[in-house]
Image (cartoon, helix red, strand yellow):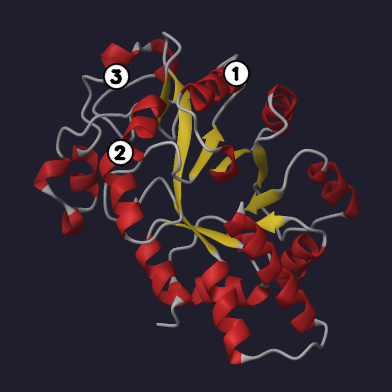
Amino acid sequence: MKKLLKTGIGALALSLTLMGADSSVVDAKEKHKDILNVAHRGASGYAPEHTITSYKMGEKMHGDYIEVDLQMTKDGELIAMHDETLDRTTNGTGQVKDYTLEEIKQLDAGSWFNEKYPERAQADYEGLQVPTLKEVFETFGKNANYYIETKSPEVYPGMEQKLLDEVNEYGINKDKLLVQSFSSESLLKMNELDPSVKLVQLLEYTSPAELTDAEVQTIKEYAMGIGPNSDMIDREYVQKAVQNGLEIHPYTVNEKEEMQKLIDWGVTGIFTNFPDLLHEVKKGK
């Protein structure tokens, strides 16, 4: 909560600067420090996404949050995986929902990375398993920063309650938990189940993004922030969000110049596959 509060203050300071207030080198450095560094699917530029290895690497590279996409198995277990299908990131095929956890645990979730990115291949990536959300919580503990997405919640009835049950079971610190989704219905359900959980509305634009007053007010009724795709937003969009009290965490930004541009516009967080690069940008390197 303190980090989010500091982030909001940083965003406010930037908006005042843009309106003509004096700024200083010190203020600029503080603003950079406050940007949330979200390790997208872990340090997924360097290791197989959504594996414990990738999450650990993200932490070592100064990622502020462990970002976990959720799918649900045939027997109702939450697992860390981006796609609804097994094909891209394992040696399995078909829909996640058609397999039990035991069956998914037999799959190799790492070798694909070595094949796709031979320049970053590591022998110990071979045979990595798909982790459950429970295993992520057990590995990193109740006080880690978690940024969890309900993926395709319409495919998995009860996903929100299951997520909340596991958050409560492991005593996860809700001050350090963010839950995001492209589905406003899923977020509204989360808000109804537990209003204390902080929510972020993901947004995807296929043309230059606009944020209307009506959209801002609707989102603010249940969410504390938004997560748009970075390639369709501009300074005006970012400023409208922060000046209306919304956190804004664009995705997915892997180039230093783009990171710097977004920080200058006033974003309060950035998703990246390369958290070490964002850390360098934040330190002025």
In the picture, the quarter occupied by the C terminus is bottom left
**Can you tell which quarter of the image residue 30 is in?**
bottom right
Mark 1 or mark 2: which comes first in sequence?
2
**Looking at the image, is 263 positioned above or below residue 148?**
below
Q: Position of residue 192 (x, y in %)?
A: 75, 24
Q: Which kind of residue does numbered mark 1 sit on?
A: Gln
Mark 1 to mark 2 CA distance (whole Å): 23 Å
Secondary structure beneath dot 3 equals helix
To which residue does mark 1 refer? 161
Q: Which kind of residue does numbered mark 2 sit on?
A: Thr
Left or right of 13: which side holds 60?
Answer: left
Q: Which mark is residue 51?
A: 2
What is the total number of numbered labels drawn onto the structure image? Answer: 3
Residue 249 visible (yes or no): no
To which residue does mark 3 refer? 104
**Looking at the image, is 4 positioned above or below residue 134?**
below
Q: Position of residue 171 (x, y in %)?
A: 49, 29
Q: Nearer the viewer, residue 2 or 84?
A: 2
Dot 2 alpha-carbon crowd within 10 angstroms: few under 14, some 14 to 19, many 20 or more: many
Q: Please tell me whether mark 1 or mark 2 is closer to you in this view.
A: 1
Secondary structure beneath dot 2 equals loop
**Measuring 44% from the left and 74% from the top, which residue is drawn there?**
256
Residue 259 visible (yes or no): yes
Dot 3 alpha-carbon crowd within 10 angstroms: few under 14, some 14 to 19, many 20 or more: many
Mark 3 or mark 1: which comes first in sequence?
3
Dot 1 alpha-carbon crowd within 10 angstroms: few under 14, some 14 to 19, many 20 or more: some
Q: Nearer the viewer, residue 24 or 151?
A: 24
Q: Which kind of residue does numbered mark 3 sit on?
A: Ile
Q: Which mark is residue 91?
A: none
